[in-house]
Amino acid sequence: MPRRERRPAECLAEDWLAFLGHRWNALILWHLTEGPLRYGELQDRLPGITPKVQSERLAGLTRRGLLVRSVSNGFPREVTYRLTAQGQALGPIILQLYEWAKASSPEAENIT
Amino acid sequence: MPRRERRPAECLAEDWLAFLGHRWNALILWHLTEGPLRYGELQDRLPGITPKVQSERLAGLTRRGLLVRSVSNGFPREVTYRLTAQGQALGPIILQLYEWAKASSPEAENIT
DNA sequence: CCGAATCCTACATGATACTG
DNA sequence: CAGTATCATGTAGGATTCGG
């Protein structure tokens, strides 16, 4: 049974918040803002992620149009992920959320 | 075992995204942007929510400093929730996310 | 009126091993 | 290199009932 129907405005924002709130998603987007990365390079930047979850996240981000996946036909094969225009447009919004959060809890400085 | 440690920047934004991504949280904030509401009034605006979950969400939002809870000493008692300055400051950010989402998927118009 | 207490189920996440 | 397959587990979310 899916979620109850709601008005589109709230539904859209809530839906995306739920998606972006899933672990690793925001972090993956964040790393890709600095340029395209291959699967393994991304893995190095996501300490603790398992291949299964990484594949799931990349597939979800791709399906939602935030990422594009490109495969080389050489060997060993290279699979590269990069942000779409949509994905890039999300960066500033997440950054704003970060600025808001930092202002809201200045004591967060002492994390490692 | 909690989440692995990460750099503060990513951690803060991710943490808040995960929190706001929990069902009902964004919707509760949204309804309160138009003014304070009592528990029951909020319940009427959240079709399908159960009292347990509503209490949990209100407690979480309060604990994180987005809401304040005030109780009347009369009978029947009135418990009112209203946004803090922090909570209000979050509104525009969520609105921006909505605008971004709407631009990203214009076909979402045909939801109800 | 505003919750708290119990119980239950589905999904999100992870561990581990294996493959084109 | 870049994944899939299988299995295990914790937590989110909900149904229901009861209390101050």
Image: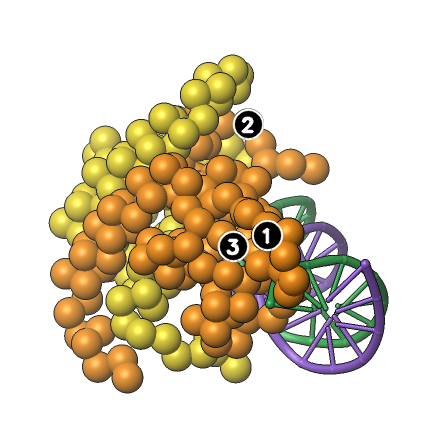
Chain colours: A orange, B yellow, C purple, D green
Viewer-nearest of discs 3 and 1 = 1
Q: Is residue A55 above or below residue B23?
A: below
First reached walking from the N terminus: tag 2 or tag 3: 2
Q: Which amino acid does label 2 sit on?
A: Glu
Co-location on one chain, circles 3 and 1: yes
Q: Which chain carries label 3?
A: A
Is the C-beta separation of discs 3 and 1 under 8 Å? yes
| Residue A59 visible, this orientation | yes
| Residue A23 visible, this orientation | no
Q: How crowded is mark 2: few (under 14 residues within 10 Å), some or many (20 or more)?
A: few
Q: Which residue is drawn at 30% across and 48% down?
A: A91
Q: What residue type is labelled 1?
A: Ser
Q: What residue type is labelled 3?
A: Thr
| Residue in the foreground of this view, choosing between B21 and A51 | A51
| Residue in the foreground of this view, choosing between A77 and B33 | A77
Left or right of B99: which side holds A52?
Answer: right
Residue designated by label 3 = A80
Q: Quadrant of residue B56?
A: bottom left
Q: Position of residue A49 (x, y in %)?
A: 55, 71
Co-location on one chain, circles 2 and 3: yes
Q: Which mark is residue A5?
A: 2
First reached walking from the N terminus: tag 2 or tag 1: 2
Q: Position of residue A38 (x, y in %)?
A: 50, 61
Q: Which chain carries label 2?
A: A
Viewer-nearest of discs 2 and 1 = 1
Q: Residue A72 carries which label?
A: 1
Q: Which residue is drawn at 45% across and 26% down?
A: B105
Q: Position of residue D16 (x, y in %)?
A: 69, 47
Q: Which chain carries label 1?
A: A
